[in-house]
Amino acid sequence: MKLSQVLFTQGFGARRECEGLIASGHVTANGQRIDDPFEEVDTRGLVFTVRGETWQYHEKALLVMNKPSGHECSQKPKHHPSVYSLLPPPLRVREVQTVGRLDEDTTGLLLFTDDGALIHRWTSPKKHVPKVYEVGCKHPVTAEQVERLLAGVKLVDDPATVKAAAAELTGPMADGLHGLRLTLTDGKYHQVKRMLAAVSNRVESLHRSGFGALRLPDDLAPGAWRWLDGPEAISPKA
């Protein structure tokens, strides 16, 4: 692939902009400075720099973020900053999208990709990809509430019955809340909050810790992101 095409596919601007970056000496590929925009490079394992910033070539973008509270999963946020503002410009230029959404006050594992087929696969209700949530409840969670969550509850303004794939008490939380780990395989609007309300409890904090086979890395700070190797790291059963 021509080096200018590499930069273009990775989100470094329009074709002419990418050609200009290379011709001006701002780009290296595998440690070698290249000033010919049309030089052919092997994209397998390609590491390049643009103005001193190191990037690795990814045919499709796939990344995980530890979403902080107070951010909206929208390109046009209304009340809070967008999660996209936490990404570097090249990823925004190549139009990565969130895989589903988290509420502005929900934290934790959030996936981004520019692969529309993967987004469809991971968000389709037919695929039943599990999502794991750490829930901080206002009131103690009883055994009867857990049984109801597993058996299925009806949500307000929704005739369908929804149930948790798994529900596990996690004990008292540091902030005085009552912990519950909930696994869901569907994705209705405000589902965790509405399910807990249906069993006469209330969600005070919500954190997504798992998506498919992936668990949020312990060393990924709120607001930080990193590349993932491929879709098999997320949901091999999807």
Image (cartoon, grey):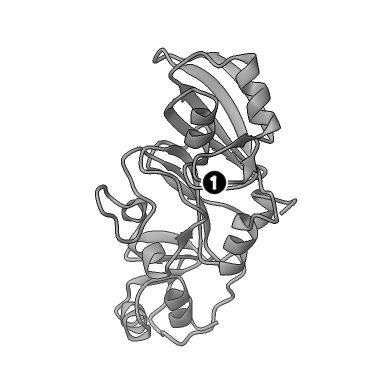
Residue in view at x 27 percent, y 49 percent: 81
Residue in view at x 45 percent, y 32 percent: 206
Give residue 225's position: percent from left, percent from top: 44, 47
Q: Residue furthest right?
A: 237
Q: Observer-nearest residue: 183 or 89?
A: 183
Give residue 11's position: percent from left, percent from top: 40, 71
Give residue 106's position: percent from left, percent from top: 42, 38
Left or right: where does residue 6 sit relative to residue 76?
Answer: right
Q: Quadrant of residue 180?
A: top right
Residue tagged 1: 158
Residue in view at x 47 percent, y 34 percent: 193
Q: Amino acid at mark 1?
A: Asp
Q: Is residue 39 visible to us here?
A: yes
Q: Observer-nearest residue: 193 or 26?
A: 193
226 versus 5 height, above or below:
above
32 versus 113 height, above or below:
below
